[in-house]
Image (cartoon, rainbow, N blue to C red):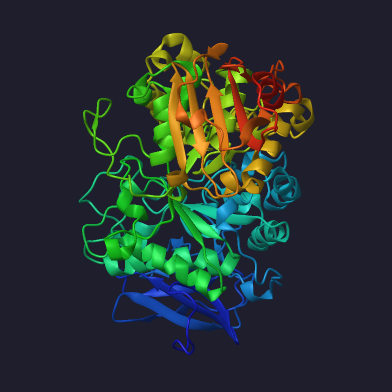
Amino acid sequence: MSPTTSARRFAVGAEVEEGGTLFRVWAPDRKRVSVVDCSGDRPEQLLLLEENGYHSGHVTGMRGGARYLFRLDDEPKLYPDPASRFQPEGPHGPSQVVESSTFAWQDSGFEESPDARVIYELHLGTFTKEGTYRAAAAQFAELAELGITTIELMPINGFPGRFGWGYDGVNPWAPVQIYGSPDDLRVLVATAHAHGLGVILDVVYNHFGPNGSYFSMFSRDYFSDAYQNDWGDPINFDGPGSPAVREFFCENARYWIEEFHFDGLRLDATQAIFDKSQPHVLADIVRAARRGGEALSKSIFIVAENEPQETKLVRSPEAGGYGIDALWNDDFHHSAMVALTGRHEAYYNDYRGTPQELISGLKWGYLFQGQHYYWQKNTRGTPALDLDARHFVTYLQNHDQIANSVTGSRVDRLTSAAELRAITALMLLSPPTPMLFQGQEFASSAPFYFFADHEGELRASADKDRRKFLEQFPSAAARQAQEQMARPAELSTFERCKLNFSERRTNAAMYALHKDLLRLRREQPALKQRLAARMHGSVLADRVLALRFLCDQGDQLLITNLGGDLELRPIAEPLLAPPPNTLWAVLLSTEDVRYGGQSYGPPWQVGKLVLPARSTILFTTKDAPKRGSERAEEESSA
C-alpha cells in the first residue's frame, strides 16, 4: 500500500489513476479500513488513516471493472463503498471501479437556451417497455420534435429491487444497475445533447432508503437526531462531523454534472434538508454544482421542490438566498386540478380553481405567500411578488400528483377532454416554465402508481404507509377505494405504468395540440419573451379569464373559457381592445377539429365576443381594413 500520490477529482470514492486505483472513504468511527479485491487477485490492503477521519490509499493494479468491498476494523462482514460509482449486483453486492475517462464525449459547446425551456419529467423504468437508459435515449428525437428542451430524470441513484421510484436510494454516486451501466447513462445524455435536449437529474439529499444503506457502519455522524423526517433519519448537515457529510453531498452534486454531463439538478423535498448553520448546505450544493458546469464551460439549471414555498431558495446569495433557478409551483397545480375536477378534498382544500387563482398563479407564482392555510392550520409561503415567472415551474401532472389518488389516473381520466385542452393551452402559452409528465402529451392511458420492490416487513409497511397517506382524502379512505388500491410491491403495479407509444397515433389530436402549442411558445415574440410583468389578466366571467401579452412586436390575447358557451356583451374590458389600427385574429383554438374539438364560429362579432364552451383561443393582431364599417369589422375579425 502506498499513500495518496496524486490529486483526486472528488473527495471520496474509487478513482482510476496511473498504475491502479485511488480509494478514499470517510469512516471516523473506524480505526482500520481495508480494500478487499473480490476477484482474489491481490491481497487485502489497508488504507491509511488521515487525521480527519478519512481513510485513503492507492491499490496497485486495480483497474476499471474490478469489484471490491471494505473491511471495517477486521470485522468478518464486508461492506460496499458509500461513494461507490456502480453496484452491478445491487446495493448489497460489491462495488465496482469505474473508469470514466474512456467515454468519448462529443458534446463540447452544448448549452440549453433558457428562454425556450420546456421540461419533460420521466421515470426510466416505465418510460419505455424495456426500461433502460438506451431505450429511453431512442425516444429523444421524438421529444425534440415535440418541442421539449429539457429531460428531467426521476432519481437513478442505486436502490434495491427490480423496480422503484428511486427516492429511497442508498447509493448516491452509483447509477442504478437495473437501467444499464454508467456508460449507458452517458449514452443517454450524449444522445439528448445530439438532439438539442438538456438533461437534469432528480437528486435526493434529505434521507437514505430503508434497505441497503450501510452509512451507519462507517459513521453515525451521517445522520442527525435533532430533526424529524417523514421518510427516514435526517442527514446531518450541522452537527458533529457535518463538514465531511456536507462535502459528501456537495461533491456528489458536482460529480453528476462533470462525470455525466448533466445540465442541472432537481433537488427533492428541500424542506427536509435541515441546516441551522451558515451558509445553508443548499447554497453550498448549488455552488458546487455550478462549479461542475464551469468545468464543462456551460451554465446549469437547478430547480427545487419545496413544500412550504420558501422563496429564499431562488434569491441570490447576495440577497440571503441559495441561488437556485426555479421552484415547483404546487399552488398552480392544485388550483388547476380543482378547476378541472371540481373536487377540493385534502391538500386541495384551500383552492377553488377560479379564474383569478389561475391568473395569479401564472403571474405571481405561489398563491400562498404568507396567508393562513387552513389545511395545515398555519401560514404558508413567503413573498414572491418581485420574482420573475422564470423562477416557477408549472404543471398539470407530475409523478407525485398522479400517484396521490386511488387509481393513479392521469388528469384526462378525471375531467372532460375539452376542459383539459383548454387548460393545457393556458399553461403552455404562459410565462412560467412548463413541465409535462411522460405520456401527458398524447393522453397516455397508463396510470402512474407508487411502486417499490420491497420484501418482508418493508413490503407490508410500504403498502400500509401508502394507504395511510391517501386516507387524508376521504374518498380514498372508503372501504371500496382501499380494496381497489394498487399494491406498491406487486410487479403488475409497476408494469401497468409503462407507456405505449402507439398512443401517439391513436391519440394524435392531443399530440398535435401539444406540438402546436409548444411551437407557438417558442416562435411567437409575445409568448417567447416569458415576462410576467408584460402579461396582464382579467376575469371576464365566472369561469372565464383573459391574458394579454404586451410586446413591441405585436400583442397577443389568450382567452380561456372553462364554462359554457358565452356571449360577452358589452365588451367592457380594456385588455380585450386590439392595438391601434389592428383587429384580433384567431391563431389557435383548442376547439379546432384537428385537436378533437367541435369547431367554432367567429369569436368577434358586431358589439360582442362569442366564446365556445370549455375552450382556449389565442389571438394575434392583423391590420384593420381601411373601410370602416361594422360589417367590415365583423368580416375581418372572423
What is the quadrant of residue 377 in the picture?
top left
Q: Quadrant of the C terminus?
A: top right
The x and y percentages for residue 109 are 65, 71
**Count of labels in the image:** 0
What is the quadrant of residue 495 in the picture?
top right
Residues 554 and 299: in front is 554
The x and y percentages for residue 425 are 59, 32
What is the quadrant of residue 52 in the picture?
bottom left
Q: Is residue 466 left or right of residue 445?
A: left
Residues 170 and 342: in front is 342
Q: Is residue 415 left or right of residue 246?
A: right
* Vertical arrangement, residue 153 with respect to residue 128, above or below: below
Residue at x 33%, y 42% (from the top left corner): 309
Residues 541 and 366: in front is 541
Residues 221 and 578: in front is 578
Residue at x 58%, y 30% (from the top left corner): 424
The x and y percentages for residue 193 are 68, 60
The x and y percentages for residue 136 are 70, 48
* Vertical arrangement, residue 5 with respect to residue 82, above or below: below
Q: Is residue 196 left or right of residue 482?
A: right
* Vertical arrangement, residue 308 with respect to residue 511, above or below: below
Can residue 334 be seen here?
Answer: no
Can residue 295 be seen here?
Answer: yes
* Vertical arrangement, residue 289 with respect to residue 297, above or below: above
